[in-house]
Amino acid sequence: MIISYSPQRPEHQIAAAQEASAHEVAEAAHRARRAQRSWAAAPAEQRASALSAVADAVAAASAELADLVITEVGKPSAEATGEVQRSIALLKYYAQQALDPVGSVHEPTGPGLLYTRRRPVGLAGLITPWNFPLAIPVWKLAPALAFGNAALLKPAPQAIGCAMRMTELFAAHLPDPEILQLLPGGAATGSAVVEHADAVSFTGSDTVGKAVVRSAASAGRRVQAEMGGQNPAIVLPDTDPETAARMITGAAMTFAGQKCTATRRVIAVGDPRDLQDALITAVNELPWGDPSAPATAVGPVIDARACDTMSEAVDEARHAGGRILVGGHRTEGVGHFFSPTLVDSLSPEHPLARREVFGPLLLLQHAPSLDEALTLANATPFGLAASIHTNDLTAALEAADRLEAGQIRINTPTTGAAVHTPFGGMKGSSYGEREQGKAAQHFYTSVHTVAVRGPQPPDTVQQRQSPSSKPGRSA
């Protein structure tokens, strides 16, 4: 049985569902494939209309959905509301993308017509995390369905309630609810989804993501994986330290730092003292606690294991000579709360500077020049997001050219992404095609080249019989 609990009230059960076995995944895949044939053959207007109807249904249930996100994963109220709105925007965007061109006409090499056309890959296997329990399933589901695929959705167990409710809203507006199959479960269920899908889209940890990529690729499946980051923010001395500190702290700590695009490291170029003081003030001013309170910015981490991970990271930092400038402790009382934590004086080679800790932990690093800051920023196995804060346009553009990240932000937080732009990273952060925007069409469809030559008239010269060839005549 898959059961989710509230991270701020761990004794409170939110939702429960029967775990899907490998056999049940196989049966679900069979039903989805059967439904997909008519869904793919339907006019694009029908798919667009269905996604528009789902967007309207999500909008009508927005307050309920935001409350569910707050309760099930501990996302602060303002961000939970924002996630619902993002889900609506994604649905509306892909409703229109269903009507976008799906091919091109080429000059033929001879008489006739030569063109390409994109067609759905068939069955999409979608494995999603708990930290964006509505938006990430939607940003995979919406394009998969828009372009004529069916889908198997395997959500994170910690967010099963959100997935169940969102699936209900989809199913109510699809011509055949079998097009979308919800498959609760853990690793074994996810492995079965990979086995039966034609294309696999994964978001989660790098350890699990690498296993998914290996399994899908060895079976000849199309696969994309988003696997986190160790995202830097470079701050040059020409920028206002208080402004930069507030922006970076928000990107690092809101929702307890549980975002793949959260800032994990801040690199101060030159004398770090002003920025350090501003960061300490900004972290101390963050309102944290009950995620349902409108002012809360930092709620709980997802579970007791996440609290343990944060405690272990702080202990590692202390043992390596790091200074805990702010926070560094669990809170007393009910709930999985850990104080927003700022750490200084760790070596760039320390594991905490290279691996992702999924929680409210920010490292302060120093570099004497922009060149050395860029080298330091790139010195990790990841490359999802990065930001630079400066008033110098030349420095900003140099950073944009040299930062090894898929998402580069200038004077803006590392967090956030527009629904119509490609999303993904470099190095160990991502594998395969980008997500979102028009890039999604490339992943969920395959290209077919069609050469057409019309019926040819009979060759009257060859078909005509000469008098000498008629029966009964001799030479």
Image (tube, grey):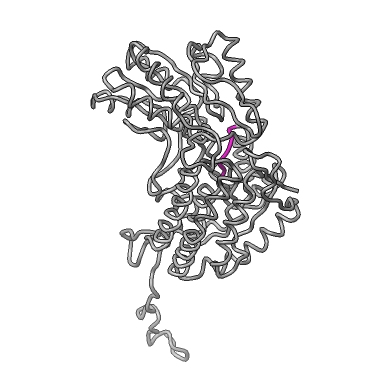
Q: Is residue 154 above or below residue 251?
A: below
Which residue is nearer to you in this view: 370 or 32?
Answer: 370
Q: Position of residue 430 (x, y in %)?
A: 50, 36
Question: With respect to residue 55, does 134 lie above or below?
Answer: above
Give the residue at x 48% y 32%. 287
Residue 470: where, in percent of width, then height?
Answer: 43, 88
- Residue at (48, 55) in percent of width and height: 143
> What segment is highlighted magenta in the picture?
202-206
Q: Residue at x 60, y 31 (%)?
A: 337
Quadrant location of the C terminus?
bottom left
Q: Residue at x 60, y 61 (%)?
A: 168
Can you name the residue that lies furthest to the bottom here?
Answer: 472
The residue closer to the viewer here, 106 or 75, is 75
Residue 181: quarter of image: bottom right
Quadrant hosting residue 98: bottom left
Q: Position of residue 183 (x, y in %)?
A: 67, 53
Numbered disc total: 0
Does 434 lie within the magenta span?
no
Q: Relative to 219, is 62 above or below?
A: below
Q: Tell me where residue 258 appears, x and y as whole percent.
A: 53, 34
Say which of 52 and 248 sits in front.
248
Quadrant of residue 96 in the image? Answer: bottom left
In the rendered view, does 369 fall on the left or right side of 184?
left
